[in-house]
Amino acid sequence: MDEALFLALISEHQGIIHKVCRLYRDIREDREDLFQEITFQLWKSHQTFKNESKISTWIYRIALNTAIASFRKKKHAIEYSPVLHDLADEQPMKNLPFVKSVYSMR
Amino acid sequence: MELNDIKTTWSTVESPRVSDQEIRDMASEKMHPVLSGIRKQLTIEIIAWSIFLICYYSMFDGDKKPVWINIVLVLSVLIPIIHNLLGYRIAKYPVQGTNIRESLNRYKSKVKVYAIASIITRQIYLSGFLLFFFNGVNFNPGKYISLAIIISIFLVQLFISYRIWAKRVKILGSALTSFR
């Protein structure tokens, strides 16, 4: 994969990278830094892409891997619920951390 | 259904656009936010410690101390620098393997080894300095107390360092567990 093709592919699929950054970082500057780290890792790994999967799958894998591997303190917004749930099963799904992260992307 | 809501949100949320030139710049190691920070720190450390090694022999009476003490001091400075250079390499290549689980497993193993080496090299560094500067000193109660305080500070640093690395390895472990 040459540089021109790499740039075209990243440009086309940059939405995936932005979404992973929004999931894993809360502050805009941290998201920009993570976007940069992911782009760097994609460039470092582009020679290993063997067309065995879709390009979007490859980008998502590298992005997720980079986001998890880089150490940052993730700050969760504190929300006070008026109702305390006794059992985990009673907790609405929308209160689960991953789901909250997805909703916070809006 | 919640899952459909999540899928819809994931698909429809708008993202900013980054230009081709910006993407090209980001692919450069010089622009990497973490690596450029590590490089700057390494550069400052290497310059500062090089100046120290050039000057310590006359400034701190290295010529009056046994040769082996001087060798220990030099090694105490060089080993952490070499260790930091290896750390740079680990930070540069966090993605290895054909899938996320394999890549994270390998990365976690490397981080664990690096964490142990980090704690050991820090102790070598501190012990080497203690050995050099306290060599030939005639101890009195005041100096014993100073030594005890310095060793206590070393132990606290050792504990804090261990906690930081343990937390990092735990985060990676948790991420790995979520992929099972």
Image: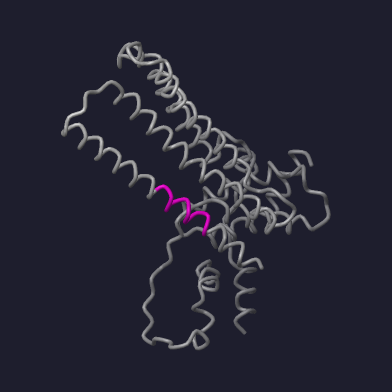
Bounds of the magenta span? B161-170
Percent coordinates x, y for residue A101 in the rendering: 52, 68
Percent coordinates x, y for residue A49 in the rendering: 78, 48
Position of residue B35 relative to residue A98, above or below, is: above
Name the one closer to the observer, B138 or A92.
B138
Q: Measuring 41% from the left and 47% from the top, which residue is drawn there?
A: B161
Q: Measuring 70% from the left and 56% from the top, which residue is drawn there?
A: B102
Whether B125 is among the magenta residues is no
Would residue A101 be found to the left or right of residue B153 on screen?
right
Percent coordinates x, y for residue B143 in the rendering: 20, 31
Prevailing SS of the magenta stretch: helix
Q: Measuring 43% from the left and 50% from the top, which residue is drawn there?
A: B162
Q: Name which quarter of the figure residue B2 lies in.
A: bottom right
Q: Name which quarter of the figure residue B176 lies in.
A: bottom right
Would residue B4 be found to the left or right of residue B41 on screen?
right
Position of residue B98 relative to residue A78, above or below, is: above
Quadrant of image for the N terminus of chain A: top right
Name the one closer to the observer, A10 or A48.
A48
